[in-house]
Image (cartoon, rainbow, N blue to C red):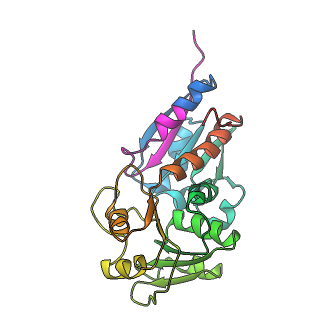
């Protein structure tokens, strides 16, 4: 009788679009690891710890909109995730939920192909935006966060990051515009008003969308303005590689990736 496979999942809402299972299952197969990775649609973010433990999952990735719930519910948070206050990776250590954030380094890897970036306009103020903003700040890249409402901006201001609402926004020139919202994931919305976007895209060089697998309205508009564009696939890959190493406790070399 074969040994029971360790189960890993991605929690999200929506989660149907996720490519994480293909990625991790291919990785498990490559290193002959006795694991299986599946999708888990989670409606209520606050139930994440109970659902994770009651299913006896060995590990999980967390995507929108549950990263902050996942942070709040973890038994122990390690590394930069303590600053970010949002996590995207859970590990089950003897019934304790250990949490990490691999989005921050994943994002920095993903934008390396753009060359030197000195200033960034970051759209959105959720868990992904928190990770990206701190990663940029630690890399001495100036970042401005732009969000619809004031409610979520305190985090950024507390970390000395410029943060503003649509109504109060005074645009300047940015090298890179980043969409960290889910706009365009399952709809055709832009992440902020079109007049704001058109204004900043005129002078920017690059645009990055954390959504992957489709040309979102944001990326389409950026392309029309002649910007170099990139979707979130590389970020998914790199944050996934780091999570994979936490899951398997093995280094993922270039061949595995």
* Residue nearest the viewer, comparing 251 with 224: 224
Rendered view: 132 above or below 172: above
In the image, is 96 to the left or to the right of 8?
A: right
* Residue nearest the viewer, comparing 126 with 31: 31
Instruction: Report the residue at 49% width, 86% height from top.
Output: 172
Rendered view: 23 above or below 100: above
**Residue segment shown in magenta:** 1-25
Instruction: Report the residue at 49% width, 67% height from top.
Output: 126
* Residue nearest the viewer, comparing 253 with 166: 253
Instruction: Report the residue at 71% width, 55% height from top.
Output: 78
In reply to whether residue 19 is colored magenta, the answer given is yes
Q: Which residue ends up furthest to the left in the rendered image? A: 188
* Picture quadrant where residue 112 is located: bottom right
Instruction: Report the residue at 39% width, 52% height from top.
Output: 13
Tally the numbered discs: 0
In reply to whether residue 184 is colored magenta, the answer given is no
- In percent of width and height, residue 243 lies at 62, 44
- In percent of width and height, residue 188 lies at 27, 62
**Quadrant into which the C terminus falls:** top right
In the image, is 213 to the left or to the right of 112?
A: left
Q: Which residue ends up furthest to the front in the rendered image? A: 226
Rendered view: 238 above or below 190: above
**Quadrant into which the N terminus falls:** top right
- In percent of width and height, residue 66 lies at 48, 57
In the image, is 157 to the left or to the right of 63?
A: right
* Picture quadrant where residue 217 is located: bottom left
Rendered view: 8 above or below 87: above
- In percent of width and height, residue 196 lies at 37, 82
């Amino acid at each position: 009788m074969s040994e029971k496979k360790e189960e890993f999942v991605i929690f999200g809402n929506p989660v149907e679009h996720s490519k994480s299972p293909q990625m991790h299952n291919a990785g498990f197969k490559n290193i002959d690891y006795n694991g299986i990775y599946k999708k888990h649609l989670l409606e209520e973010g606050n139930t994440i710890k109970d659902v994770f433990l009651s299913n006896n999952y060995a590990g999980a990735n967390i995507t929108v909109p549950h990263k902050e719930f996942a942070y709040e519910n973890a038994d122990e948070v390690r590394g930069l995730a303590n600053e970010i206050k949002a996590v995207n990776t859970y590990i089950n250590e003897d019934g304790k939920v250990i949490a990490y954030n691999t989005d921050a380094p994943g994002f920095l890897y993903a934008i390396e192909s753009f060359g030197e970036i000195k200033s960034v306009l970051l759209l959105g103020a959720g868990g992904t935006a928190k990770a990206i903003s701190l990663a940029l700040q630690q890399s001495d890249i100036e970042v401005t966060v732009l969000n619809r409402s004031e409610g979520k901006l305190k985090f950024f201001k507390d970390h000395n990051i410029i943060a503003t609402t649509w109504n109060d926004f005074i645009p300047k020139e940015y090298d890179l515009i980043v969409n960290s919202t889910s706009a365009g994931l399952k709809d055709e919305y832009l992440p902020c008003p079109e007049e704001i976007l058109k204004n900043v895209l005129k002078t920017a060089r690059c645009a990055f969308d954390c959504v992957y697998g489709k040309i979102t309205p944001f990326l389409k508009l950026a392309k029309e303005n002649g910007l170099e564009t990139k979707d979130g696939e590389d970020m998914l890959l790199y944050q996934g590689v780091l999570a994979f190493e936490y899951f398997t406790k093995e280094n993922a070399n270039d061949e595995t990736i």
